[in-house]
Amino acid sequence: MDILTLVEGIGESPSAAIFGMITGLIFGVSAQRSQFCLRAATVEFARGRLGPKVAVWFLTLSTAIVWVQAAQLLGLFRGADARIMAVPGSWSGAIIGGLMFGVGMVLSRGCSGRLLVLASTGNLRSVVSGLIFAVTAQMSLHGMLSPLRDRLASLSITGSENVNLLSALHLPNGSGLVLGLMFAALALYLAAKNQIGPKTWIFASGVGFAVAVGWGLSWQLAQVAFDPVPVTSVTFSGPSANTLMFFLDRKAVLEFDVGLVPGVVIGAFAASMFAGEFRWQSFDSVPVMRRSMIGAVLMGFGAMLAGGCAIGNGVTGGSVFAATAWLALFCMWIGAIVTTLMVDRQADPALAC
């Protein structure tokens, strides 16, 4: 693809939106077919199992790391330019926001990315929870919750920019790719142990590949654009809020985020229709609805405080080894595991997907 020709033909903002949609389409199809879900993985782990959901999650993470780190070694991407690395990170935000997000995704029976995929397949519970998540994220970014978010995030800051774990540990060049391959070996072992079929692990890898595609396309666009372009990839906290405002504010402009969310919706919808899995579903009961709504609020605020959702931190930020992303991911696991053991012990992890 000749990016410069595309930019000169249609402009930088529409090009960014197209790249976001391409990334979203890959993610949507892959996530729907693989049933990728961090919440389900944490539930399995909390119950002492390294089952198929954990295997799918490791396949996604390892694929993202391998592709992103390989692209960096080949000069096709520069992690230091990534938006998550170019701005100060918040240790306190990662801890508090990560814990809140972990609690929220268990109560909502799915992380923000999984809710978007489920909503695209006819799950009305996920539609409601996803809208609440997006509104809360917008309130936390620019609305009445933003002062609280700023206050909590400012308790402990990394410095002028985020910390790269590989550099902080003084690891040699290429160590990120080696670590990714080690994760991949573990993922393939778990996939074989749980008798995961080739289609599932291929699509699980596709979720991670979508993250690499997003990084690569947005970085390449930034190299030829006249105005500054954020180097970003798959995440659903800021994009959900930005996409919501795009349809509410006539002055909003096209960008990567605005293309990403519709791309995921179209991809997941098409995949579910093709597989005959599109089903209209609603809330099981009033208590379930109440739990899901509370969980969506916790996820919306927690994601903006932590600097990203389970995908944005756990896969996208993790693939460039942003320190706050790995800390937030760890706290998401802790929050989800504790919540599962306390209030969700009797639930079937398959219900999340």
Image: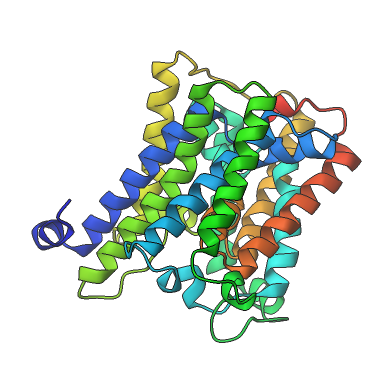
Who's the residue at 31% across and 70% down the image?
Answer: 229
Percent of width and height locating residue 263: 36, 41
Q: Position of residue 315 (x, y in %)?
A: 56, 52
Name above or below for residue 178 compared with residue 224: above
Residue 291 placement: quadrant: top right
Left or right? Give the position of 160 relative to 336: left
The image position of residue 35, as x and y in percent, is: 57, 30
On the image, the x and y values in percent for residue 172 come to 54, 71
Quadrant placement of the C terminus: top right
Residue at horizontal 33 percent and vertical 60 percent from the top? 218
Q: Is residue 144 visible?
A: no
Q: Residue at horizontal 49%, vertical 70%?
A: 173
Relative placement, left or right, of 138 versus 302 is left
Q: Nearer the viewer, residue 79 or 236?
A: 79
Using the image, determine if residue 149 lies above or below residue 347: below
Task: Identify the image quadrant of residue 326.
Answer: bottom right
Q: Is residue 169 above or below residue 197?
A: below
Say which residue appears at 79% left-offset and 52% top-offset: 335
In the displayed structure, 348 sits above or below 36; it is: above
Residue at the extreme bottom:
160
Q: Nearer the viewer, residue 133 or 62?
A: 62
